[in-house]
Amino acid sequence: MGFLSSTVSMARYKVDGKFEGQILETVADGLKKNIISEIDGNPVEKTIGWTSFENPFKPGFKGSSFSIGTYLVFSMRIDRKVIPAKVIKKHIAIEAAKLLAVSGRSFFSKDEKAAIKDRVINALILRIPATPNVYDILWNYEDSEIWFFSSLKAANEEFETLFTKSFNLTPIRLFPYTMAELTAGLTHAQRDALSNISSTKFTK
Amino acid sequence: MLDISFAYSRYKFLGNEFLTWLWFIVENDRERLKKIEKDLVSLNIGNRIVLENKINDAVETITILGDDAGLEEGIMSLGKGAVVTEINLLYKSGDNEWRFTIKGESMNISNLKIPETAVVESSEDIEGMVLEKAYLYEKITNLIDNLFKEFIKLRVSGKWNESIVPEIRKWIYPEEK
């Protein structure tokens, strides 16, 4: 459910800190340094990186193409090769049978079985195409706010790590406590009160 | 500011209390809603409320579904100690309508449906579409921020226990009014 979908899910972040240099150049630099790389045909199981919002399967950041109005708009892509367990099992059985026939033996040791499994998985990873997942991001730099268009915990965690690595700024997830601290405009006295509250019992 | 993961668990209850208060306000205090959100035409409970009740170590989840679902069962659950953990809302402003769900614990917004926007026919249209959609999403993030701001200021004040909680109890247990 991306930004342009008819229904969306989103998690919100506040960004701690601002850039010292040129904003667009710094963002472009961070995006380009961590752009998604293709893993099809490579012995790699998973990759994560930035891609363009308009063409997520043709990653690239020409000029300031990611800047729309006052927003910075781009996407995070996670490509993962998922090999069904039954496919792995089948290929291990085929490979094991072949090796047993060649060697004339009747069984393999535990270590040999593990080695066959690794070899089979590596061979399958080379052949199987990666499944891409694209998550859109809208960054209001002026307000230091980000909308990440997915509420999946794992995707949010990957985003937080990649964002910090790319821009050297920390995205702080907005949930009840951080909203109270960062967006509600509480006074010092109100913050002190917040630190001491415990849950309410609405029952009699 | 506290460590983020510690704060998430420590203040989990705040989001659920916010949603419980919000349901109470929607049902009982429309004037307050109008003061909080000037552009508001209406804010109503949508087609889903999820409540949770912790009894000893077990968690009982009550889900009320459907556009015309009776909410009495939900109020009864509140009376037994449940809190709202997820709520679907229907917001109207001008001639436009938004639907969305908020989860108390994370404040994530899901199933957000905004008013119709123009169809993208070429790549030149994308910029306009992004700005239009961003404006429409922002209406909801601003609404949530304004509602939460009102809630949290009450929650950390003496008013919460002195008058708000007793009013919510009167709503939950109407026969004892």
Image: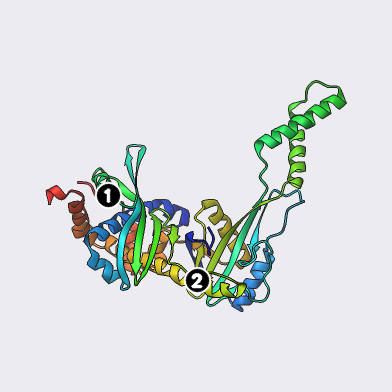
Residue A180 place in picture, x, y as percent: 37, 63
Q: In this view, does A43 lie to the left or right of B162?
A: right
The residue beneath circle 2 is B118
Per the rendering, the mark at residue B148 is none
For numbered disc 2, what is the local secondary structure? loop
Chain letter belonging to callout 1 = B
Q: In this view, does A62 lie to the left or right of B79?
A: right
For numbered disc 1, what is the local secondary structure? loop
Q: How crowded is mark 2: few (under 14 residues within 10 Å), some or many (20 or more)?
A: few
Residue A162 place in picture, x, y as percent: 61, 60
| Residue type at numbered disc 1 | Leu
Q: Can residue B132 be seen in this view?
A: yes
Figure quadrant of the N terminus of chain B: bottom left
Q: Is residue A197 above or below residue B153?
A: above
Mark toward the start of the polypeptide (1 vs 2): 1
The residue beneath circle 1 is B71
Dividing the picture into quarters, in which one does residue B27 lie?
A: bottom left
Q: Can residue A17 be seen in this view?
A: no
Residue at 19% x, 46% y: name it.
A204
Chain letter belonging to callout 2 = B
Residue at 27% x, 49% y: name it.
B71
| Residue type at numbered disc 2 | Ala
